[in-house]
Structure formats: structure tokens, C-alpha cells
Amino acid sequence: MIRLKFYDYGNMQLDVEKELGIEIETEDFLITNIPSLEFEAMDFEADLEDNIIFWFSSKQELIDVQKIKKLIYSRISDTPMQFDIKITDNFD
């Protein structure tokens, strides 16, 4: 399972799509650009709106984590939004 978290602590109006400069939902953008990903779920840490977590499954997790990082770094610009990505055994 791939856990992708976007956050900008204290920003109660976090808009990942705007920060990435995309016009479709984040999960759709990622699976369109990385077809081996399968969207599983979306969550918020501590029910706050200054972060969002996306869960994906993939048969090639290590490769897809690198592809996600490369894709996000190519889109993220002058923004305080950050992201964290890791492989985990379950939803945590």
C-alpha cells in the first residue's frame, strides 16, 4: 500500500489541485499518469483540513513511489505545501 500525504499545517484551505496546477482530482491525475496505480481511499489526519492522505495499491510499489515523487516534484512550485510518501502494510 502506498500512502501519499499532502500537508500545509495551519492552512485550513489546502487545495492540492491548485498547488499542483492541475484541473482534475489528484487521484485521477496520478492514475492517469501512472497507470499501474490503483486508488484505494482518501483520508484526513486528525480530521483537519490542512492535510489529505491518498492510499494507492500497486504491484510495483517501489517503482511507482519513485514515479509519484518525480511527477509531484515536476508540478510543485513556489508553495508551502509539502508531501510525504511511504509504503506501508495497511491503512495507518
Image (tube, rainbow, N blue to C red):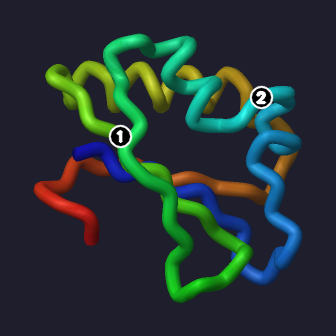
Q: Position of residue 2 (x, y in %)?
A: 30, 44
Q: Determine which quarter of the picture holds residue 36.
A: top left
Q: Residue at horizontal 55%, vertical 72%?
A: 44
Q: Residues within 10 Å of mark 1 (few under 14, many from 20)?
A: many
Q: Position of residue 37 (x, y in %)?
A: 36, 24
Q: Residue at horizontal 81%, vertical 36%?
A: 77
Q: Residue at horizontal 80%, vertical 63%?
A: 14
Compare marks 2 and 1 and give the one earlier in the sequence.
2
Q: Residues within 10 Å of mark 2 (few under 14, many from 20)?
A: few
Element carrying mark 1: strand
Q: Considering only vertical position in the picture, is 32 above or below 16?
A: above
Q: Determine which quarter of the picture holds residue 67.
A: top left
Q: Position of residue 80 (x, y in %)?
A: 79, 58
Q: Is residue 19 left or right of residue 92?
A: right
Q: Position of residue 78 (x, y in %)?
A: 86, 43
Residue beneath label 1, please?
56
Q: Between 47 and 11, which is closer to the camera in this rendering?
A: 47
Q: Is residue 24 left or right of residue 67?
A: right
Q: Amino acid at mark 2?
A: Ile
- The quarter of the rendered structure image containing the N terminus is top left
Q: Between 69 and 1, which is closer to the camera in this rendering?
A: 1
Residue beneath label 2, please?
24
